[in-house]
């Protein structure tokens, strides 16, 4: 379940180029390598 939730948040960030919330942003920026960040080069 946790994996599906994180995948949904990643897809949201990929589509809208912004994270849904600060907690999600912190989790992804700490866990994923920079090249997998869906919001990079959009701000």
Image: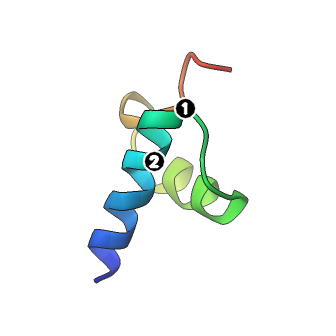
Residue 21 location, x and y as percent? Answer: 68, 58
Q: Earlier in the sequence, mark 1 or mark 2?
A: 2
Disc tally is 2
Q: Which residue is mark 2?
A: 12
Q: Secondary structure at mark 2?
A: helix
Residue 30 location, x and y as percent? Answer: 53, 54
Q: Nearer the viewer, residue 22 or 17?
A: 17
> Position of 43 compared to 1: left or right?
right
In the displayed orientation, state which residue is furthest to the bottom: 1
Spatial CA span between label 1 and label 2:
8 Å
Q: Residue at x 28, y 72 (%)?
A: 3
| Mark 1 surroundings within 10 Å by alpha-carbon count, few (fewer than 14), some (14 through 19), many (20 or more) | some
Q: Which residue is mark 1?
A: 17
> Position of 30 compared to 15: left or right?
right
Q: Secondary structure at mark 1?
A: loop
Q: Residue at x 43, y 35 (%)?
A: 15
Q: Residue at x 49, y 42 (%)?
A: 13
| Mark 2 surroundings within 10 Å by alpha-carbon count, few (fewer than 14), some (14 through 19), many (20 or more) | some
> Position of 8 compared to 3: left or right?
right
Q: Image height check: is 2 above or below 33?
A: below
Quadrant of res 38: top left
């Amino acid at each position: 379940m946790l994996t599906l939730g994180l995948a949904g948040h990643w897809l949201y960030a990929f589509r809208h180029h912004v994270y849904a919330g600060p907690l999600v942003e912190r989790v992804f920026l700490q866990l994923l390598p920079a090249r997998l960040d869906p919001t990079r080069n959009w701000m």
